[in-house]
Image (cartoon, helix red, strand yellow):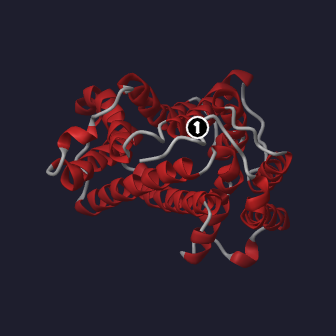
């Protein structure tokens, strides 16, 4: 299998697990502070890293020449949910936030070009735009109560996009260090607030939070490997598959009825899936290059 297709498959794993996490986390977000759920997720992530790698070579978890860069990237994983929480508290609806957030794959391509010299072919830009249009059909634009509130979904989109691009720039680092620092930064930032926010979860809710942490670790592992395999622009259109997979999961779980989806949503799904299939079929002709393509991942 080519590196390009490996990156596409790993990105599909990433967005599929991301969709599952969102559905699972929604069950507990109604009863607990979102910051508690996020903090618990990354505590579980840290514990997993220590159990799997800590007893063999604990120093490898923190061995890096770029600790500040690692921690700055980690804080983007706090900035993303924090932007969502503040947007909700300011009066935005979830649909309004997501309709803006989904410019993020386009930002991945743009930021990759600016900071990694990732020269995406025109076909990749077009596929990303087509998938973005499909996502707009699924999440139509909503009027904002105030233009200044646009800062929250934009902050969410920029946090995610910058995290993806920065992860690509760390492809020469150990994956275990990349994953450990991601969790460590969020843990350190949120821990001082936990005494005032913590609410002891019911046993079933605790199981859900732990499951979110385990899947979250696997999710970020898949993203790390996807960005190491090929320049970020190639798999950027595939990020939109998160929207399609979320809907498919909701239908499979009986939350949504497949026959009740509006026509525009069905058309949007076709555009998203079509764009992903396009980059899969044409990957050998796209051949994006970036400044890190010659570096060997570890």
- Give the residue number, with chain letter if any, for mark 1: 292
Q: Is residue 71 above or below residue 49?
A: above
x and y, in percent, of residue 134 in the image? 80, 56
Q: Residues within 10 Å of mark 1 (few under 14, many from 20)?
A: some
Which residue is nearer to you in this view: 293 or 248? Answer: 293
Can residue 140 be seen here? The reply is yes
Q: Is residue 265 above or below residue 225?
A: below
Q: How many marks?
A: 1
Residue 152 is left or right of residue 264, and the answer is: left
Which residue is nearer to you in this view: 26 or 218? Answer: 218
Residue 184 is left or right of residue 279, and the answer is: left
x and y, in percent, of residue 122 in the image? 85, 45
Residue 109, by quadrant, is: top right
Residue visible at 74% across and 73% down in the picture: 260
Q: Is residue 193 above or below residue 212?
A: above
Residue 118, by quadrant, is: top right
Residue visible at 64% across and 53% down in the picture: 239
Could you tell me which secondary element the residue under label 1 belongs to? loop
Can residue 198 be seen here? The reply is no
x and y, in percent, of residue 45 in the image? 31, 49
Residue visible at 67% across and 56% down in the picture: 238
Residue visible at 52% across and 30% down in the picture: 86
Residue 190 is left or right of residue 270, and the answer is: left
Q: Furthest residue to the left?
A: 55
x and y, in percent, of residue 259 in the image? 74, 78
Q: Is residue 251 above or below residue 4?
A: below
Quadrant location of the N terminus? bottom right
């Amino acid at each position: 299998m080519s590196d390009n297709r490996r990156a596409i498959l790993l990105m599909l794993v990433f967005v599929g697990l991301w969709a599952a996490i969102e559905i699972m986390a929604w069950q507990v977000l109604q009863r607990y502070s979102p910051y508690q759920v996020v903090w618990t997720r990354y505590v579980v992530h840290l514990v997993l890293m220590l159990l799997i790698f800590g007893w063999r070579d604990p120093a490898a978890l923190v061995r890096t020449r770029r600790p500040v860069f690692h921690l700055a990237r980690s804080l983007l994983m706090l900035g993303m949910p924090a932007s969502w929480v503040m947007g909700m508290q300011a009066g935005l609806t979830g649909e309004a936030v997501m309709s803006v957030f989904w410019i993020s794959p386009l930002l991945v391509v743009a930021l990759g070009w600016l900071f990694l010299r990732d020269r995406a072919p025109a076909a990749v830009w077009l596929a990303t735009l087509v998938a973005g249009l499909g996502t707009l059909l699924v999440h139509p634009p909503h009027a904002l109560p105030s233009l200044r509130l646009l800062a929250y979904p934009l902050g969410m989109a920029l946090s995610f996009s910058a995290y993806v691009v920065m992860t690509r720039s760390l492809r020469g680092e150990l994956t275990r260090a990349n994953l450990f620092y991601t969790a460590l930064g969020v843990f350190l930032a949120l821990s001082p607030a936990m005494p005032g926010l913590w609410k002891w979860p019911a046993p079933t809710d605790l199981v859900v939070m732990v499951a979110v942490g385990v899947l979250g670790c696997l999710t970020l592992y898949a993203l790390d490997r996807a960005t190491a395999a090929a320049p970020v622009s190639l798999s950027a259109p595939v990020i939109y598959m998160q929207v399609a997979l979320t809907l498919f999961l909701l239908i499979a779980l009986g939350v949504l009825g497949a026959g009740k989806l509006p026509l525009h949503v069905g058309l949007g799904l076709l555009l998203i899936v079509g764009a992903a299939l396009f980059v899969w079929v044409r990957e050998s002709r796209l051949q994006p290059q970036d400044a890190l393509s010659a570096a060997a991942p570890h």
